[in-house]
Image (spheres, grey):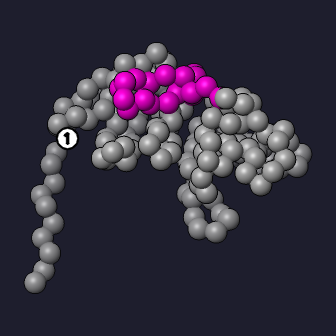
Amino acid sequence: SSATRPALTAIVSPGSPVNLLAVLNLPRPSLFAAANGKFYKLVSGAWIEVVSVVGITGSRPVVAVPYIFDLFCLNDGTPAVYNSTANTLTPWVATAGTIPTDCRIGCTYEGAVWLFKRHEVFSSRVGNPYDWDSSQDDPGAPLDGTSSAFGLLTEPLTACIPLRGRMI
């Protein structure tokens, strides 16, 4: 017997232009969008505005970085984190070090959040996306792309794809 694919369901955009579309595996998968300077979550087929104390700028794409049950967002201003319990978008505050700003690309890889700003590469501590203190010297310590030990990329980074082994 052959399998049948379920029918696709159309989703109406929360506004125009939509400059983020992200899926986060909270207790169950959730769809998010940013449009017209606001952040939305799809609930039962309708876009619900997320309460945001962080400004979303429509002139630049919003980048989403899923990390286990968190969703981190990058935009023109303050890096932000989505709180699924309160349905809020609040500033992403480091418990150690400083979260790099003005990053345009991000991903999760080997238990850390990786952020990219033009020629610079940064990572959080493995297992803790709130620890950015790169002065630590242990195998899971955060990395700072502006240090001479880590180096700089020769060309601006335009995308990242986490792969297996030790490659992004």
Residue 119, how many percent across, how many down? Answer: 73, 44
Q: Report whether residue 32 is seen.
A: yes
Amino acid type assigned to the residue bearing label 1 in the image: Ile
Q: Which residues are magenta?
A: 76-94
Q: Is residue 137 magenta?
A: no
> Which residue is at 57% across, 64% downward?
163
Residue 105 image offset from top left, x and y in percent: 58, 42
Residue at 88% of width from left, 49% of height from top?
A: 149
Residue 64 visible at all: no
Q: Position of residue 63 (x, y in %)?
A: 50, 38
Q: Is residue 154 left or right of residue 129?
A: right
Of residues 13 and 147, the one nearer the viewer is 147
Residue identified by numbered label 1: 11
Residue 144 place in picture, x, y as percent: 77, 41
Near-viewer residue (93 or 166):
93
Q: Secondary structure at mark 1?
A: loop
Q: Quadrant of the C terminus?
A: bottom right
Q: Quarter of the image for the N terminus: give it.
A: bottom left
User: Number of marks in the image?
Assistant: 1
